[in-house]
Image: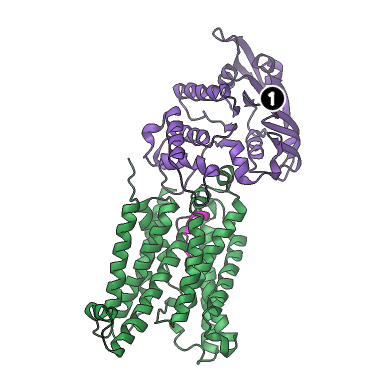
Chain colours: A purple, B green
Amino acid sequence: MTAPALKFERVTFGYGGSPVLAELDLTIRPAELVGLLGPNGVGKTTFVRLASGALAPSAGRIELFGEDLAALAARERARRVAVVPQETHPVFEFTVSEIVRMGRAPHLGFLGLETQRDRDLARDAMRRCSVEHLADRSFRALSGGEHQRVLLARALTQEAPLLLLDEPTAFLDIRHRLAAYDVLVGLRDAGLAVVVVSHDINLAARHCDRLVLMHGGGVVADGVPAEVLTPASIGEAYGVDVEILTDPSTGRPFVIATSPR
Amino acid sequence: MTVRRGGPVGLALLAVLALAVLIVAVSVGASPLGFRDLLSILAGHGDASSRAILLDVRLARVLLAGVVGAALASAGAAYQAVLRNPLADPFILGVSGGAALGATIFVAVSPTSAIGSPLGRPLAAFLGAVATLVVLFGLARFRGRTATTALLLTGVVLNAFDSAIIQFFVTAGDPARFQGTLAYLMGAMGSPPWGALASVAALTAIGVGILGANAHTLNLLSLGAEEAGQLGVPVERSTWVVVLAASLITAAAVAFTGIVGFVGLIVPHAMRAVFGPDHRALLPACAIAGAATVAAADAAARTLLAPVELPVGVITAVIGGPFFLVLLLRRLRAS
């Protein structure tokens, strides 16, 4: 049995005041596409930061592919887990291609010089994320949706077996949302572990194998979409009343929020 | 808008241009010796006095100016990346002032036999630069863009403080020790002893080499600590390595020549416009163009009011001050 891609064991973390995450247990396995849901401020972004080593837990243990995350050097960590942040604000005028090629950083040698293979991987990732035509444009001049596609391409270029995406589709139009999920499903099929933080419950329900609903510093529900998306769990997490239909094309649940509680 | 970048060919052209500037700088000065005399001396001819003027006075001085320029421009580029702030510059941050203070204290208190040692002043300057950075880190909390105002203000105050203490030492200290150092605050190039030149050049080579080896790390650090870490950079360690290397070359630049402002601001900006922000191309471009810029500024300082010499920092400040204000204005408009 292979080690899980990511394992949180009783992880607690707070930014000073009351903990954002309290003794969180969560395991993500390879070849799994997991949607991480929950209301604002519930600790989804904190989860991504902890899992990528940007923050260290105040208690508990995090494992990446069976290894203690805290014991991994930054470079080794970045070869195992790639992150698509919500947004990025470079202060300099990097081109899209330069930003995407930065994903190769944990694989480059002493002087940070790129080989043809590095450039090919970046080009391929840009094609998959439909940003190839933007390669020589200034990143800062692009729209929010284009930024997100570029950041996804950068994460693909990183070639990590675990991918964490923090609301990667927030600024995308519906066509590009579907295209982005197509890419993620493809990655899952190729054996990657993929975790998507999302506010779009229905999009996540349609594409993810498994949903994790967070609230109050922990997990409210965890399982296949039909198990997780119930009026009770959504009511508890989001504080809204919902009606749940069945998506006729997939058989997955489809949530309509009707009123705040 | 497609972005075009000057590549290796652009760098080669820049190097040729810089070499031409250095040769012109050696060819102009208070005495009427010019390019022909330089050629004949290099060919092994020429009398002893023109030899002394061209090589020991002018060439040494132009080389010092070149090394100082390369150091300040590279340091500026490095500070701008780690601070995520395009307005950072060794002078504006107060690092040059701290280095100058360190060197001044060394001159004031060191035993007479050690004053002339080629490494004493640079190392004291390095300590001054690092002390400044510790204060800067403490007060302005480096990361993130919100710190801009705090950073610039801290630099202004540190500069004023350092200048005051330097003035105190120069005024109250032994005049023999501080001969000719009044101009120190605005950059007193002078013709260095070869030992001092070698020391400055060696320290600059070490620091620029360290920055060069971390060029791609600078790209990643410029995205911010969190992203750099997620892309595999050991952020804390890399930041210190880069900042210490930049401070070492700032100290080397300041030790014997005093404070030459704005070079670390102007040159990286101009080079970024031509070569882009990738430090693997930007750093060599800054080193080359920085050398040419200070050599040219010093040639102007020597010749504009000849036989009177202006401090070289006057030239760079006259150009750099307005340049800084324009950048600041653009930044304020954008936000």
Q: Chain of mark 1?
A: A
Is residue B313 visible in this depiction of the protein? no
Magenta span contains residue A147: no
The residue most toward the left is: B36
Magenta run includes residue B92 = yes
Q: Main secondary structure of the magenta part?
A: loop
Q: Is residue A244 above or below residue B291?
A: above
Quadrant of residue A167 within the rendered picture: top right
Q: Kindly identify the residue that appears in the image at 30 percent across and 77 percent down.
A: B26
The image quadrant that residue A164 belongs to is top right
The residue positioned farthest toward the top in the image shown: A248
Q: Which is nearer the eye, B64 or B47? A: B47
Q: Position of residue B90 (x, y in %)?
A: 48, 66
Residue topped by disc 1 = A237
**B185 or B22: nearer the viewer:** B22
* Label 1 Cα crowd, 10 Å radius (few <14 / some 14-19 / many 20+): some
Position of B7 compared to A243: left or right?
left
Q: Count of labels shown?
A: 1
* Boundaries of the magenta span: B78-93
Q: Position of residue B249 (x, y in %)?
A: 50, 68
**Residue A67: x %, y % from top left:** 71, 38
User: Which quadrant holds the N terminus of chain A?
Assistant: top right
Q: Quadrant of the C terminus of chain A?
A: top right
Name the spot of residue B86 as percent of width and height, x first.
45, 55
Q: Amino acid at mark 1?
A: Ala
Q: Nearer the viewer, residue A234 or B275?
A: B275
**In the displayed structure, would residue B152 be above or below residue B33?**
above
Q: Is residue A199 above or below residue B335?
A: above
